[in-house]
Amino acid sequence: MNHSTDASTGKSYKSSFMLKLVLFPCLMFGFGFLLIPLYDVFCDITGLNGKFDLVSQQTANQQQSSQQQPSQVAGLESTSSGLQIEPHNVILQFTAASDQQDVWKFLPASSQLNVQTGKQYKTHFTLQNPTDQEMVFTSIPSISPGLAADYLIKTECFCFEKQVLQAGEQVEMPLIFQLRNDIPKEYSKLTLAYRIYAQAKI
Amino acid sequence: MEIVTRIIQLTVLACISVSTHSAWELNMTKSATAIGREIHGLHMTIFYVCVAIAIVVFGIMLYSIIRHRKSLGATAKPFHESTVVEIIWTTIPLIILVVMAIPATQTLIAMYDTETSDIDIKVTGYQWKWRYEYLSEQEQGIDFFSTLTTSQDQMIGLETKSENYLLEVDNAVVIPINKKVRFLFTAQDVIHSWWVPELAVKKDAIPGFINESWTKVEKVGTYRGQCAELCGQGHGYMPIVVKAVSAEDYQAWVKEQKSKQLNANKVEELTMEQLMAQGKASYDKNCAACHQVSGLGIPPVFPALKDSPIALGDMEKHIDIVVNGQPGTAMAAFGEQLTPTEIAAIITYERNAWGNNKGDSIQGAEIVSFKQAQGQ
Amino acid sequence: MTHSAAPATGIKRWLYTTNHKDIGSMYLIFSLIMLLVGGTMALLIRSELFQPGLQLMQPDFFNQMTTLHGVIMVFGAIMPAFVGMANWLIPMMVGAPDMALPRINNWSFWLLPFAFSMVLSTLFMEGGAPNFGWTFYAPLSTTYAPPSVTFFIFSVHIMGISSVMGAVNVIATIMNMRAPGMNYMKMPMFVWTWLITAFLLLAVMPVLAGVVTMMLMDIHFGTSFFDAAGGGDPVMFQHIFWFFGHPEVYIMILPAFGIVSHIIPTFARKPLFGYHSMVIATSSIAVLSFIVWAHHMFTVGMPLVGELFFMYSTMLIAVPTGVKVFNWIATMFRGSMTFETPMLFSIAFVVLFTIGGLSGLMLAIAPADFQYHDTYFVVAHFHYVLVPGALFSIIAGVYFWIPKWTGVMYNEAMGKFHFWMSFIGVNLTFFPMHFIGLAGMPRRIPDYALQFADFNMVASIGAFLFGLSQLIFVYNIVQCMRQRGCPASPEVWESAEGLEWTVDSPAPYHTFQTPPVIK
């Protein structure tokens, strides 16, 4: 090939160029997997799916709740966050689902609460293991509208960890939460949904 | 021959009157909601913009195709660049787009209104039916499945197709007019999409997560739609029927539903013939999509029931698999989807149809006690 | 140099060949076969949809047909046809003796027959072929998929490797093998559009490979990327898929732009209008294609900000696309036009692709998309850009260059007949789909409500007209390959520009072994 690039310098240029051409698809393959953490960031920013980042939220909650504890004990409006927003009321609905709703009897204690922002509430979900096996289950929370996920602070939730249930056991699983004062007024009705996925403990 | 006459008929129809024949609907469905009308307006605006662009662009093209042909002695003018012209035809579309984006943005913001609602309904997509749970306090406890009622015979042409072929269900979702109804969508298994064209609501139902959308219907009526996301072989067979009724009718319906819910576990004794008759009807509706009317299934994903070890084996096991499903497979738990009587009829039918000659039968009461033994 | 050797004979010539012309021919013939296979599936689909009711097949088989039709047409027909043309034409257009990496070239072709045999073999497997649509959304394609999905994933991997190698080859050829004096702004448009396409391929095919690998891991290795039960998210599948999928759409249309930009100037006897703006427009379409993916997912429940962003960015794509259409029309304006078959197909391309583009603009309007999404309106839209878009440009290109490839002029009367049958057929098939989509018919359903019956029947009749008229195309090609017809001159066309027209017809086995001089 007696072309413009067949000088001896062209050769090394060419092989490094080829290397780049091969490396680039490999990098893009990696990028495909990188999209997963990127997607979580994306969800965080935009509130897509009402998806929670469970771990980081839990730690964030601990910090936040320890900060806000005194003002709440005193029954005052939480001003420690530096926000000058008056508390207001929001309706929070609860709904639960499982593979077989009438078998698992996974139900919220109350179907909806009229929640004042900035105040801490406690409610629970009941669940019964209908099988004769020890079961492990995970609970996947989701909130709608999705952007409201940022404003719901869960201090204690059965969704933080996998739960184990003995055969036939019935439990009340607590949920302690509060809504941040700065939740925009247009989110006047929220729905918090839990979906459980169970499998036999091995 | 029938096809030929049909084609002639079609051509004639198309020539005479496109608009009078309802089946020759050309445009987007007219909506029964304010948002729907806005969307329809947007659709028409963008459509006219497109038509205008097309007329100008194709007009110039047609002109030069007619006038600037070699056979007419046209000689080529070899111009090939003009910065001014190029800037103009980059800017004009940009301006059109900006003008279009403004109303589109307004409508979108209106659709995302999250102000409080009067009624909340949780819609769950199943393969291949919908479940509606009313969440608001007044309707607390109303919870039902909505399944296609079109018979298999209509589909395979043994029966004439009814007016609402493939768009009819056993339990329609009922909502009052002029109230803001908020829908929460989720799915049990795969992704579905809840779509009623006349309400202009389409939202994906995603397993594990919830989505919301809302509607405020202005006119009493029955609105029909279909699942709009491929969800397996029954994708075309999970229609949506919404009945919008007056406030009084709605109250009456709520009352009726609540009493129905109380009587859900009441069962009556049926004879073998009755069980087999109801069994066939319920089987064709709920089971035949996978296991086929013939009971032969589509192995290996959907096993045959004819000569199957379960249908010919232990009754307890047969009940268990129908009531609780088979985790990890497509076999759903029908315990909550069907009444005990229906389950009993289906099981009896499966044990005695297609040459399965088990000869035994079961009553709804036994299903109830089976479920109770499970702690339900 | 081995290059100057005469071609080997028999099967060995085709198995071991490293000649860009041989490989190009094999790609083109392969894609023609795949077009006929995928087309047969389309006709099966249209037969089932001829009337309401289930006449010919079970819903599950219907879904297998729609899935395989999509996969085969996208990865088996359109993409290999463009690669075949790139093989034949790029070295000749830039004045190079061959592709830069001839052995890789051979390998990337021979992977394809294996990949597609594997895809087609799934039809005979227990549980049937993949039935989850060519977009294979999880969890339908993971937890709920038939066992053959593993073979599907494996063959997508092979197709991906083949495409990436093809793209590497094209880039290396264009960047290193141009004849002296051919700088970037002198390159023919087809070379330019393919260079940009190759970069798109390099960027997104690995992402597709990534997403199918995640599926594979979800199915067999217990991960849960897309399963909510294990903390995954099915919507994430769609984001990753469409991050690949939208650039993929442009991979299928950019080379078409290139082909048409050669044919229209030739038959208008005028240079292409706005060469520089064409290059800029193509590049900006490629760049924009990376930030519009979620317009395929307006109904998944994205927050308002996301919807608005993807709506605006999608609308923006209309600008460079418009520039291209205007440039083609300005090229025709005040030309001296004749209407041979390639020109007819190119004009139809401009008109019908523009219609597809305009319906694309309608789909970009997010609130309206809530009504259009996943209906036949979308089916009409993407078939308008892919059939009279990509496919017509390929047909036009074949008619345009086949005298150069075979040395024989195709039968012009048959070509024109082919054009008019295809033109009528394609519009009869896909135009009514706009109406049934707007009226509310969802896509991918094997049976439909009665109000959609009439237009579906029209579409089915059109599909058979279109499908059968492609047999004329096959006849024309076979006649040329058998050397039946008038011999073609080196220039072939009266005012064709470009290096490929300076060599003999048929092009000798080895061309430009000494680089040509570029003015």
Image (cartoon, coloured by chain):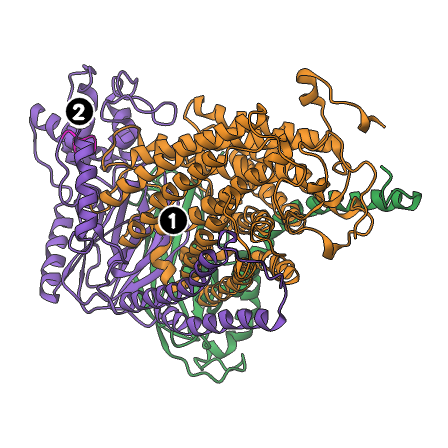
According to the image, label 2 marks what residue?
B349
> For the residue marked with disc 2, what is the amino acid?
Tyr
Task: Specify the farthest residue to the front.
Answer: B73
Residue C120: x, y in percent? 49, 26
Depth order, front residue of C12/B114: C12
Residue B338: x, y in percent? 21, 39
B95 relative to A109 in the view: left or right:
right
Chain of the residue displaying label 1: C
Asked if residue B76 can be seen in this view, the reply is yes
Chain of the residue displaying label 2: B
Residue C282 sits in which quadrant? bottom right
Residue B176: x, y in percent? 17, 64
Q: Which chain is orange?
A: C
The quarter of the image holding the N terminus of chain C is: top right
According to the image, label 1 marks what residue?
C380
Q: Which chain is purple?
A: B
The residue carrying pointer 2 sits among few (fewer than 14), some (14 to 19) or many (20 or more) residues within 10 Å by Cα, namely many
Q: Label 2, label 1: how many angstroms apart (C-alpha)? A: 44 Å
